[in-house]
Structures are given as C-alpha cells and as structure tokens.
C-alpha cells in the first residue's frame, strides 16, 4: 500500500530470527514449539527446525510466546483546536511496542465539512513517517452527504479502510441524526464495512452540561455528572436497533459502563452482530478520580464516554470481556498535556478529552483478567489481538502465530511485576491515569516485523518502519452472518385484489390548520405530514392510479415468519 | 356520527337512590360481602342491614361480584384526522364503553401542531360535554414545542385539571419531538407535577423503513407492520426511560404493543425508574398476523401504531406482565375508522388512518385472558382495569374504588357470562371488529354510572351529555411521592478546589473547532459563570465518589 514515497529505511541487519523453547499461545490452543522467522514473516514452526547458520536466536525458556497485541483504537497526533495530542505516531507506537502491542489502528478524524480522503492522506503521511509498528486506519464520518458517500466508497475499494466511526454525541458538531445513522449503516452494510459508533446521547448531554454549568459546577466532576452512564446505554441500545434494521455489523467503541456492556450482551444473546470494545481505562480504573482535589489529575481522566464513578465497573467489564460478551480491547489512547487540558480550567466542557492506555493495555488485562482466573491465556490472545485481526479482516496475517503470518510476537513474562507511573512510562504526558498500579505480567521481548524491538526492558524502535496494513471489506468474522441474513430478509407484499369500495374524502393537510407558523424548529417542514414523508421518496415510483404490481411478483409472508431475522429465538 | 343525529332526551332514570344488596364487593385490595347504598351519584353507605329510605330501587346481586367501574385511560373518540373524524364520537364511544363495564374514559386532546393547547382542550371539552354518556377526563398531547407551549401547559394544569401530557417519538415531521425537546418537555412536566406520556416508536427509522418498503412495491397494510418492527418500539421506550430518569420525571408509556417494549419497561422498573406501561385491548387480545389478510379492508382495520405484533404469543406475554405488575394499566386506544376512511390508504399503507376498537371489549377480554386463566385474581383485575388508573391520574379514591364517598360507578360482574364478539352486535359505528369471533367469558350484568343504572338485562340506557369532566390535580401521590424524595437527593455540588494556575495551552480560535459541543451548552450557561472570578467555596461540596446523585439506580 505504501504508494507515498516511503523512504528506504535501512533494514535492521539480521532478517532471520529463531525463538527457541517457547510455548506458543494462540487464541485456540497453546503448544511448545520453536518459531523461525525470515523477512518479517513466520517461516517455520516446530521442533528441531532446520535453519540457516548464524541466525540470531532468542531463548524463550518455556515462556509464553503470543501474537503481538493489536490496539484497535488510538488517537495519535490528533489535532485539536490548533494543538496536537502529545503522543505522535512515533511516541505512541513506541509506547505501544513497549507494552507488547505490535499493531495499532488509529482513527482518522476529518473536520466536519472536510474531505475524508484528504484527512485520510494526512493521517497516512503522519503514520508512514513516524510509526514504529504496523498500523491501519479507521475513518470517522463526521458529516454525511453524497460526496462523503463517494469518498467512503473509494476508501473501502481503494484505500484499505473497512471500518468507519459515527458519533451519536457532540451535538452540532460530529453528531449524526437517527436518519443519517440509518443511511450510513445501510450504505456500509452494502459495501462490507463495519459501522463503529461513539455511543452517547449528545442531545441530552448538551442539556445536562448546560444544567451543570448553571449550577456552578465547572470542574472535571461536571464532565461525568453531565454524561451519566444511562446516556451511554441509551445510545448503544439505539445504535443496535438501527444496525439491526439495516442488517449492518456494529462495533461499539469505548464501552465504559456496566449498563452499556449489558445492552451489548443482551443484543448478542438476541443474535445481533455487535462487538463491544472496552478500553484500557474502563478495564483498569474508574471515575472516582473526577472528584480529585487536584484539578490537573482530575482533568487527566476526562474522556468520553466518561469513566464510571461506580468503582466495581472495571471488574464487571473484565468479566464481560472474559465471557466473550465484549470482544476486543483498545486503548483510545489520546493524551494531552496538563497545559492543554487547562484550556478547560474554568469550564469542563472545554477540557480536551482522552486518556492514556496504549502501553498499559496488555499488562493490565493480564493482571485483571488472567491472574484472577477470569480468562485463560488463549482468551487473552483473543481479546488483545486475534479478535481485532478478524474484525479488521487481517486474520491470520495478524493475530496468530502460524506459518505465513507476520512475525509480530511477544514473549510474555507472566511473573514480571511493574508499577505504572508517569515517571517511567513512554508516553509524553505528565499524568498516567493508572499511576501507582502494580501489574503482574509484561513483555520480556517484543518482536515486530521479525525484528527485536524490546529486549530486557530496552527499546530499539525505529520510527517510520511501520507499514500501513490495508483492511479489505466484508470481513468473514462479521459478514458471514450478515450475508446469510440478507438472503432471508426479502420482503414480499400480500397479493390482494384492488380495494374497490368507497373512499372517504380527506384533505392532505392535517385538519386544514395553517399550523406551523408558530413552530420553533426551522428544520420541520410545516406543510408536510407523516404520510408525505413516506411519499416523498417512494411516491414517484408508485403512481396512485396505476394498479399495483402483478400478483405473480408477490408472495405471502407467513405470519410470524416475517423476515426480521435478527430475532433468532 | 350517530351521536349527534337528534338523540331524543331520554328521561333520567327516576330514582337517584339505589341499593345493591348481597354484593361481593371487589376492590383492588380485598373482596367482601356487603350492601351498597348510593344517593346522588355517590356511595353513601356500605355494610350489612343498611338503613335506607323507603322506595329505593334495589338490585339483588345474589353474591355476585360488584366492582368499581372500569376506567379506560386511553380513548380517541371523535378524533380529527385530515379532514375526517374517527367513526365513534363521544356519544357512540362512551355508550360502547358503558356496555363493556367502563364508566370513565380519558380521551386524548390532539392539537394541530402549532395550535394553542388550551384552544384544542376547550374544543374537546365542548365535544365531550355535549355527548359523553359517562364521566371523562382529558390528556393533552404536546404536538409541538415552543415557549408558549410551556405557559399553556401551566394553564392546563392549574386552571383546567389536566395532569398528563403525551409526547410523540414517532410521526416524523408532524408530531415528533427531538430528544432535546423531550428533555425540556419532561422537565416542565416534572415541575408542574404532571405525568409524561409517551408514544414510543422511533419515527426517524420508521420514515426510512416506510420509504424502503414502498420502494419494494409493498403498499398494503402488511407494509405498516413491516416498516414498524417491534425493535423500533423497544428502542423508543428505552430512550424515553433514559430521558425520564435524567429529568426525574414520571413516565407513562401508552400502547405497549410488543414483548420487547414490555421487557424494557419491566427492566427499567427493576432498576427503580418511575415508569408505567399501558397495554391496550388490541395488544392483549389479538396479534398482527391479520395484516397479511387477503381481505384489504380487514387487514386495514388492524392498522394502529405501534402495530400489533406479528408474533402470536405476544398477547399472552403481555397479559402475564400485566398480571405480575410489570405493566399496570389498560386502555383501549379506541380510535375507529370506517372502511371507506381507511381506504384513503388503499394504495399506500402510510396513508391509512390509524386506530383500532377496544373500549367495549377491554374488561371482558382481560377477564377472559387473565382471570379465567388464573394469571390474576379479581382484585388484580380491578387494579389493572380501574384502580391503578385512578391512582396514577389522581382521581383516587373518588374513582377506582368502592368506598363511602366514592362516585357511584359500579359494575355487577358475571364471571360466567360468555359472549362472542362480533361487529354485528357491537355498539360501534364501524364495520369491522378486530376481535371478531373471539369468545370471551365474563361480562357486566349491570352497569351503574353516576348512581344510575345504564345497563341492565342486556339493554343500554345511556344519557347523552350527562358525562362530567373530571378534573385532576397535579402531584398525584401514587406517582410523586417517589419523585419528590428523589429530587431532594439529586442536588449536585462541585468539588472545592484551588484555582488552577499552571500553564494553559494557546488555542487557535478556529470557529469550526470552537463550535463543538461545548459552545452549544455555553449559550445557556455562559452568561452567569464569569471565567475570571473564583467561585465561592461555600457553594461546593464534594459529591462522594460512587455516591453520585444518580439515584434512579436503586440497585
């Protein structure tokens, strides 16, 4: 994909690598074997491999070797009101590698009204120049019209993007209406894309923010008070409903609360194709810190949806992740300096949003979910790497240790104990929201593109070696089911004779009242009514006086057996 | 309709005094044997061996059940729709109600969007006062939202005895309000002490689906239900519950038509939300398979919104939830149209006027589906057909209970009476009955409204225009005790902190970026929060982490 003059960085000398005596952990099984890599690709797996002489050998000593983590949600180098987040692609991907993550998927955020393609190119440039590990891109749809449609189409077909995020929050800015969501989801479903949503009810948030500020609450606690978790759950519910109507696979980014997770879990039980992404922050800490007396500390936790003030949330989300109700993990890493956060020192609504987590993600999940016995090491691989690769349609190139897969590996030390602190982390931010947390489990060595980038705690990263990995449309993981449903979802009309009885007189305008002059909302078209709205698009195709279509084309839908196939029960 | 065609003045039944002897009185809390003596439309004595004036008309109950007359909380009699009027007017409708054992109805005032609520209310009062045969009250629908609306709602609550307002989440570009508007309406309703009713369906999605279904060439009534799948109902219920929780406003979901919508309500109740669900005769008694009928007129007669569910197990499920208390009240949403009126949508289902019958059948249907089957006892039956409605809408114990001082609205109920529902025999002005052919067990033998016998030995003697408007006070105890306790808890405080005095990043004032969510909230609040003045610490107390004031989460 690297069509933009990627300068030829001199490759690290040794292109061949042998990992000996490791216990390979995939999402389905664990087994002892050696791994031989050449040119960034796994060439052989087995015992007593025949390899060329002089190959650099890493002794795993029976430790686990897992597929490198995939952080499916980052915001590196994100522009915000003229400033940029402190971790750029170099700093961010370095931190990722330090934590055992060998691929990141960043979000392209075009300004509303701007070209998606231009924004994509801009992000590609930043990623290609600086990223130390492979990366892919999601593209956020921040406005919707015909030209955006075309751009989305060519992003899918030509640019290797298969996932697009829409926002249900950020009223008057990124927020999409229900009708737009319906339209976007329908569009993506036809073209094999994944619809990602930022799920919060932006309308109610705007009302609540106004209320908080009126009450004189201006600090970071106002952020969480104005965004109660019910608003997250409500939006998740709505997104699922729309996705189900349009038969589009849905991916909920940043699952931050119990109730949002519950809605996803229920929907999955009903058969909806929906994936939930808790992030490092929601799995590792909670929203009690918004009440910290230290403004800068409190502000460092500001992200949306906010961390839940319920301290039992992280444990709950880890359990849901372990049971498979939530599918993948990201970090939503988006860090701002204290000075940047201070833009909102007198008004919490102005605080730039985002938390760290790209470096801590793997260790944190290991500590919270594997050492506690919630999940085994295979499930750990699934939620940190494999499932993400499947959703992005990169499997088995990524997310699996197998012959032919990319040589992105981590030798995992289950006993290593680290204390997280901003003093030692690889992010450029002054605060770390996991400050002081002691985590068991960490990478001992990280191999990225067949090269050792972390060894015994030292980083050897090379900025700019990261390749853009194109994701193709129609990932099997989501679309096998979607396609089957589509075949079922054909609706037919009932063949009936024409109704030829009397028809009442009626006026098309409701009650003949010249109503709407008094109405406030300029968006509403006064003279239209419900029925018109149905007509407006469909009307032209079905002239009133032409008899309905020949009966041969219509088959009775059996009662009860209508084609709302999402209800599998 | 037949109502206004010169109904001769039926002489009032002579005796204003009435004694029911040997009755098994059934209230929502207990049943007991006693006599009931009524005078001037009010119950004066209850007990054995009552001392009553001579010459009183006596009804022998012979140990049969006497229960409070039913309250149909949801009717739409004489409803205007695009220049037409629904077939049953207040006379015909209340007559049918009385025939079924219902002695009070609450109708919906539907103002044209933009038209004065008070004017519409007065219009409905005029229609009902001249025609209604039983007591009635009125809900007012908020079909548009602007500043004037708020004052009108206040007037309606304070001067006109209205304590319930309906908002629509459906009917895009007609009645539908946005989430922000709903939030504001609900805040106003809470301050007024009224009840927020919601027609819960996602109108945006419905509009898209309608377009899609029409494009597929599906124009018949089956398109109505295909374009309004039950998920869309459940979604809107969930959203309404969320907004009601945020605003701490009591919520009432009208027309619960599907399992999933009922489930959302049940779940919300378990989480502590103050929410009530109203299934209707149609959803309790029949299902949406009829939309596929080859008879267009029959299929069209089932068109109502939210639609009847095509899942035939739905009625049984809703009856169960009604029995266990997850759903509390029942209405009929009675809104009938002649076939010729329905036929304006003969080539496009989106034009079919919506509504079904049910005011006459409601009581018998519920008895048959719930009491006969052992889902509920007769006391719970009284609760869901009458008492709960009276409590929620604050007319209890005047209505909804047999007690001294209560209105003399009674029904002598025969649990063994069987009847086959048919359009041939019903008291309605329409050709179709959606319950056609259903045999129900249980029905009224005698109906007493305002202390007068209106149904006896199968013959109806309703009096046109004798129905009184029952005004309802705000802050119904049944609803607002909890709301009030919660609003005392929901005071939020900021954290007392020193002023942040560290470095602040420069921000480019690109208006594009500035016009974020933040600025939209600024418009309201920016004025009084002066950025440069440190806030008084006394105003702020730490909200304890985990103990934030989201008290709706009782779990």
Image (cartoon, coloured by chain):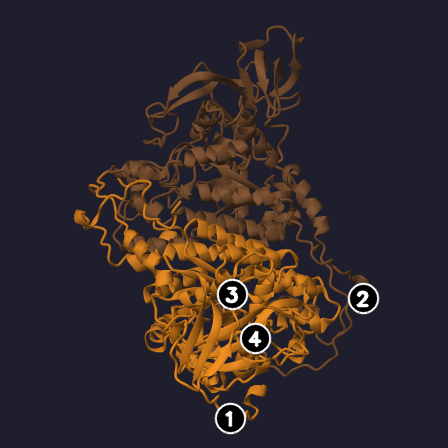
The letter of the orange chain is: B
In the structure shown, which secondary structural element does the residue marked by tag 3 occupy?
A: loop
Q: Which numbered mark, 3 or 4, is in the foreground of this view?
A: 4
Structural distance between the alpha carbons of marks 1 and 3 = 32 Å
* Pointer 3 with pointer 4, Cβ within 8 A: no
Answer above or below: position of A52 versus B485. Answer: above
Q: Which residue is mark 4?
A: B445
Q: Which residue is mark 2?
A: A551
Same-chain check, marks 3 and 4: yes
Q: Which residue is mark 1?
A: B9
Residue in the picture at 56% in, 10% down = A56
Q: Give whichever of B243, A470 is nearer the camera.
A: B243
Residue in the picture at 49% in, 55% down = B326
Mark 1 and mark 3 lie on one chain; the one further toward the N terminus is: 1
Q: Which numbered mark, 1 or 4, is in the foreground of this view?
A: 4
Answer above or below: position of A435 versus A532. Answer: above
In this view, the residue farthest toward the right is A552
* Position of residue B308 measured from the top left corner of the image (x, y, whole percent): 62, 63
Q: Chain of mark 2?
A: A
Same-chain check, marks 2 and 1: no
Indicate which disc residue A139 carries.
none
Residue in the picture at 33% in, 41% down = B546
Q: Give whichever of A359, A472 is nearer the camera.
A: A359
Same-chain check, marks 1 and 4: yes
The letter of the brown chain is: A
Q: Which residue is mark 3?
A: B330
* Position of residue A288 measured from the top left corner of the image (x, y, whole percent): 33, 38
């Amino acid at each position: 994909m690297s069509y933009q003059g990627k300068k030829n960085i001199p490759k690290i000398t040794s292109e061949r690598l042998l990992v000996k005596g490791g216990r390979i952990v995939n999402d389905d099984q664990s087994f002892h074997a050696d791994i031989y890599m050449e040119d960034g690709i796994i060439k052989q797996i087995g015992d007593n491999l025949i390899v060329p002489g002089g190959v650099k050998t890493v002794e795993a000593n029976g430790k686990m070797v897992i597929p490198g983590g995939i952080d499916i949600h980052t915001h590196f180098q994100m522009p915000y009101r003229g400033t940029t987040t402190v971790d750029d692609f170099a700093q961010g991907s370095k931190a990722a590698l330090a934590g055992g993550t060998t691929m990141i998927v960043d979000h392209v955020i075009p300004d509303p009204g701007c070209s998606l393609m231009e924004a994509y190119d801009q992000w590609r440039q930043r990623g290609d120049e600086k990223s130390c590990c492979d990366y892919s891109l999601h593209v956020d749809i921040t406005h919707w019209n015909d030209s955006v449609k075309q751009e989305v189409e060519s992003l899918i077909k030509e640019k290797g993007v298969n996932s697009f995020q829409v926002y249900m929050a950020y009223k008057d800015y990124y927020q999409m209406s229900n009708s737009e969501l319906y339209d976007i989801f329908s569009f993506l479903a036809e073209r094999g894309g994944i619809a990602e949503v930022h799920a919060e009810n932006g309308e109610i948030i705007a009302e609540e923010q106004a209320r908080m500020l009126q009450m004189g609450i201006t600090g970071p606690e106002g952020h969480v008070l104005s965004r109660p978790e019910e608003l997250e759950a409500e939006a998740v519910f709505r997104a699922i409903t729309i996705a189900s109507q349009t038969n589009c696979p849905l991916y909920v980014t940043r699952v931050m609360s119990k109730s949002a997770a519950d809605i996803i879990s229920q929907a999955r039980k009903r058969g909806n194709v929906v994936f939930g992404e808790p992030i490092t922050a929601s799995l590792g800490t909670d929203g009690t810190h918004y009440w910290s007396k230290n403004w800068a500390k409190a502000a460092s936790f500001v992200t949306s949806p906010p961390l839940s003030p319920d301290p039992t949330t992280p444990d709950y989300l880890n359990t849901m992740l372990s049971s498979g109700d939530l599918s993948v993990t990201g970090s939503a890493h988006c860090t701002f300096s204290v000075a940047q956060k201070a833009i909102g020192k007198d008004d919490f609504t102005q605080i730039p949003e985002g938390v760290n987590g790209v470096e801590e993600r793997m260790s944190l999940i290991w500590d919270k979910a594997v050492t506690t016995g919630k999940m085994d090491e295979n499930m750990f691989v699934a939620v940190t790497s494999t499932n993400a690769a499947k959703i992005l349609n990169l499997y088995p190139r990524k997310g699996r240790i197998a012959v032919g897969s990319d040589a992105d590996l981590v030798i995992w030390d289950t006993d290593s104990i680290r204390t997280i602190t901003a003093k030692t982390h690889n992010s450029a931010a002054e605060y770390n929201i996991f400050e002081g947390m002691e985590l068991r489990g960490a990478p001992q060595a990280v191999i990225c593109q067949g090269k050792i980038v972390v060894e015994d705690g030292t980083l050897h990263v090379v900025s700019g070696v990261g390749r853009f990995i194109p994701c193709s449309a129609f990932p099997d993981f989501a679309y096998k089911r979607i396609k089957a449903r589509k075949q079922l979802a054909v609706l037919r009309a009932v063949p009936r004779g024409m109704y030829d009885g009397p028809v009442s007189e009626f006026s098309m305008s409701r009650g003949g009242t010249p109503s709407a002059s008094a109405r406030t909302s300029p968006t509403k078209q006064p003279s239209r009514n419900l029925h018109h709205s149905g007509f407006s698009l469909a009307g032209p195709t079905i002239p009133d006086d032409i008899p309905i279509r020949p009966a041969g084309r219509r088959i009775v839908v059996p009662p009860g057996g209508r084609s709302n196939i999402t209800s599998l029960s | 309709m037949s109502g206004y065609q010169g109904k001769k003045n039926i002489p009032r039944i002579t005796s204003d005094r009435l004694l029911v002897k040997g009755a098994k009185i059934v209230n929502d809390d207990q049943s007991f044997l006693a006599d009931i003596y009524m005078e001037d439309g009010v119950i004066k004595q209850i007990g054995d061996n009552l001392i009553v004036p001579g010459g009183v008309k006596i009804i022998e109950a012979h140990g049969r059940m006497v229960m409070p007359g039913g309250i149909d909380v949801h009717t739409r009699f004489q409803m205007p729709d695009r220049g037409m009027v629904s077939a049953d007017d207040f006379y015909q409708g209340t007559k049918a109600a009385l025939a079924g054992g219902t002695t009070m109805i609450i109708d919906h005032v539907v103002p044209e969007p933009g038209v004065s609520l008070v004017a519409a209310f007065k219009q409905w009062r005029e229609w009902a006062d001249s025609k209604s045969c039983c007591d009635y009250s009125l809900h007012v629908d908020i079909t548009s939202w602007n500043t004037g609306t708020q004052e009108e709602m206040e007037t309606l609550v304070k001067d006109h005895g209205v304590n319930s307002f309906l908002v629509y989440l459906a009917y895009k570009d007609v009645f539908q309000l946005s989430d922000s508007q709903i939030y504001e309406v609900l805040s106003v309703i809470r301050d007024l002490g009224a009840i927020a009713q919601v027609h819960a369906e996602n109108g945006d999605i419905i509009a898209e689906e309608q377009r899609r279904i029409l494009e597929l060439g599906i124009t018949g009534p089956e398109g109505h239900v295909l374009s309004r799948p039950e998920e869309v109902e459940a979604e809107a219920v969930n959203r309404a519950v969320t907004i009601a929780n945020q605003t701490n406003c009591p919520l009432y979901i009208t027309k619960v038509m599907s399992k999933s919508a009922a489930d959302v309500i049940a779940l919300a109740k378990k989480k502590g939300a103050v929410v009530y669900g109203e299934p209707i005769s149609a959803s309790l008694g029949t299902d949406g398979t009829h939309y596929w009928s080859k008879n267009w007129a029959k299929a069209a007669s089932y068109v109502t919104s939210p639609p009847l569910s095509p899942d035939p197990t739905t009625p049984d499920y809703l009856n169960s939830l009604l029995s266990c208390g997850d759903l509390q009240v029942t209405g009929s949403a009675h809104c009938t149209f002649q076939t010729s009126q329905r036929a304006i949508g003969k080539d496009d289902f989106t034009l079919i006027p919506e509504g079904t019958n049910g005011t006459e059948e409601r009581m018998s249907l519920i008895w048959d589906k719930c009491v006969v089957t052992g889902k509920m006892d007769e006391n719970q039956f009284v609760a869901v057909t009458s008492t709960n409605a009276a409590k929620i809408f604050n007319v209890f114990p005047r209505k909804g209970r047999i007690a001294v001082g209560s209105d003399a609205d009674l029904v002598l109920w025969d649990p063994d009476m069987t009847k086959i529902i048919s359009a041939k025999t019903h008291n309605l002005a329409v050709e179709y009955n959606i319950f056609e052919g259903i045999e129900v067990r249980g029905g009224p033998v005698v109906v007493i409204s305002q202390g007068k016998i209106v149904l006896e030995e199968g013959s109806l003697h309703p009096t046109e225009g004798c129905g009184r408007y029952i005004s309802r006070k705000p802050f119904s105890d049944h609803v607002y005790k909890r709301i009030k306790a919660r609003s005392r808890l929901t005071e939020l405080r900021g954290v007392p902190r020193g002023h942040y005095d560290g470095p602040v990043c420069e921000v480019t004032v690109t208006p594009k970026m500035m016009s974020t969510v933040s600025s939209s909230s600024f418009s309201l609040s920016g004025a009084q929060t002066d950025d440069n003045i440190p806030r008084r610490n006394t105003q702020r107390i730490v909200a304890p982490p985990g103990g934030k004031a989201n008290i709706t989460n009782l779990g």
